Amino acid sequence: MNRTLAIAGRELRAYFLTPGGYIIIALFLLITGGVFVFAGFGSGEVASMRTVFGLGTWLLTFVAPAITMRLFAEEFRLGTFEALMTSPVREIEVVLGKFLGATGMLIAILAPTLIYVIALEVYGRPDYGEIACGYLGLMLAGTAYLACGTLASTLTNSQTVAFLMALFFWLVLGIGTKLLPQHLEDPWSRIVFLLDPDVRLRDFTIGLLDTANVVFFLTVAAFFLVAAVFSLNVRRS
């Protein structure tokens, strides 16, 4: 556990050693802030965070691969992976450490958006249950995206390729699960429909907590992390 946390801390610090980490945080806050101002308080509607959560989950499909693309690909490119693995550390500790570091960066990206909650408190009556559910959805989706990106980064020594692989997977999954059910019979159409991340996230954005949706994202994240460990085992052997 200590080795895992040490790796996580090193990875998290690395995001802030270059302007890249700050740029990602600033862009995410700028885009979601604009939507919050114009949609959250627009047309005389009740102020809420629903639009921000909806946009945020879409943005994370791009942000998460950008966070994870360097985790292993950069180690492979620089030749430092071999040195890392010669130390008394197991593959699972490395994968979890790097994943936790990326998760810390995800929290750093989402944390500034809490200012929107303060604005809602000043100008309206926020539903804190709905807001908590929305943030939970963002974190769950984000961890699934990060786990996928972690696996992608173990498969190549190119950060660009790792980014594109993770992004392509989620785009294909999102589009495919919307189009395929129209051409399938039950129960297959229903199964494919339930694999749609947007369907799973919809309840979170309106404040509905369904344990099936929580289990879905945790299972997806666990699958990709196990696959990443297997990928490192193959590379190491």
Image (cartoon, grey):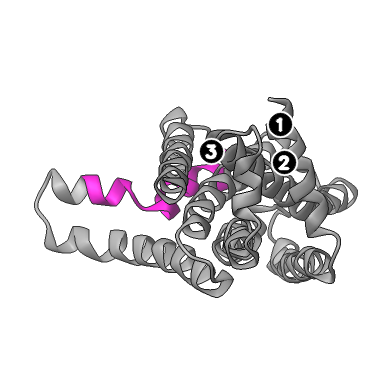
Per the image, the residue denoted by label 1 is: 3
Q: Earlier in the sequence, mark 1 or mark 3?
A: 1
- Picture disc at residue 70: none
- Asked whether the viewer can see residue 211, the reply is yes
Report x, y in % for residue 130: 64, 39
- Determine the residue located farthest toward the top in the rendered image: 1
Circles 1, 2 touching at the beta carbon (< 8 Å): yes
Magenta span has 120?
no
Q: Which residues are magenta?
A: 191-208
Per the image, the residue denoted by label 3 is: 91
Callout 3 secondary element = helix
Examine the rendered structure and indicate whether residue 1 appears above or below residue 114. above
The residue drawn where x is 31% and y is 46% is 194
Magenta span has 206?
yes
The residue drawn where x is 71% and y is 45% is 101
- Callout 1 amino acid: Arg
Report x, y in % for residue 208: 53, 36
- Callout 3 amino acid: Glu
* Label 1 – label 2 distance at C-alpha: 6 Å
Report x, y in % for residue 11: 74, 50
**Nearer-the-camera pick, 75 or 86:** 86
**Nearer-the-camera pick, 10 or 88:** 88
- Callout 2 amino acid: Ile
Report x, y in % for residue 82: 59, 51
Callout 1 secondary element = helix
**Residue 73 in which image quadrant:** bottom right
* Label 1 – label 3 distance at C-alpha: 11 Å
The residue drawn where x is 60% and y is 38% is 96
Per the image, the residue denoted by label 2 is: 7
**Magenta stretch prevailing secondary structure:** helix
